[in-house]
Amino acid sequence: MILEFMRDDHRVCDELFVTAENALSDKKIDEAKKLYEEFYLLTNHHFDMEEKQLFITFEKRTGMMGGPTQMMRYEHQQLRAQMEAMLKALRDDKYDDFFGIGESFMIMLQQHNMKEEQMLYPMIDRALSGDGELMVETLKEMPKGNPL
Ligand SMILES: [Fe+2]
Ligand SMILES: [Fe+2]
């Protein structure tokens, strides 16, 4: 159930990013900026759900501290930095920079999400056993960031 909930959230974020890129390609600048900012907030929120709830709970229950969760945190740092750089590029109207960073960002994000969906989320679901629903409720209640 964590797998399902978080996989759906990956899809929502992905689609927002593609929609933002398409708007920018069509020279709909304001719309692209709005969509990208939405993507930025949602994806940072997604990483927060993982870092502040899922990973910590998983580590407590399994005692696995230096394994997959640590690797995912490290990848979040790199992804967050790229997202920040894209936000800046967009605000400075450097669209080529935005697309350039976006290309490697999307490859890294897809690989990251695949590792979570195929390996880590199923492990978290097993570790949570009967408490999966409760965790989903907790995640739903986590506040999203304020509009930029
Ligand atoms: Fe992640
Ligand atoms: Fe994720």
Image (cartoon, rainbow, N blue to C red):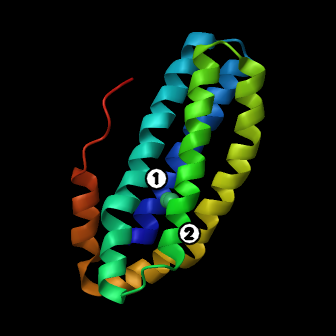
- Numbered label attached to residue 147: none
Q: Nearer the viewer, residue 104 or 31?
A: 104
The image shows residue 61 at horizontal and vertical percentages of 30, 85
Residue at x 36% of width, y 88% of height: 62
- The mark tally for this picture is 2
Tell me: residue 126, above or below residue 17.
below
Spatial CA span between label 1 and label 2: 20 Å
| Residue type, label 2 | Met
In the image, residue 77 sits, relative to residue 125, either above or below, namely above
Residue 73 left/right relative to 90: left
| Helix, strand or loop under label 1 | helix
The residue where tag 1 is placed is 9
Task: Establish if 115 lies above or below 49.
Answer: below
Residue found at x 53% / y 76%: 68
Question: Viewer-proximal residue, 77 or 108?
Answer: 77
The one of 146 and 12 positioned closer to us in this rendering: 146
Whether residue 84 sits left or right of residue 18 in the image: it is left
Q: Amino acid at mark 1?
A: Asp
Q: Quadrant of residue 98?
A: top right
Kindly give the residue lying farthest to the front in the view shown. 66
Which label lies toward us, 1 or 2? 2
Q: Which residue is mark 2?
A: 71
Q: Earlier in the sequence, mark 1 or mark 2?
A: 1
Q: Residue at x 42, y 80 (%)?
A: 65
x and y, in percent, of residue 143 in the image: 25, 44
Ligand 2 within 8 angstroms of badge 1 C-beta? yes
Q: Nearer the viewer, residue 80 or 12?
A: 80
Q: Quadrant of residue 51?
A: bottom left
Q: Would residue 128 appear left or right of 91 to someone viewing this image?
A: left
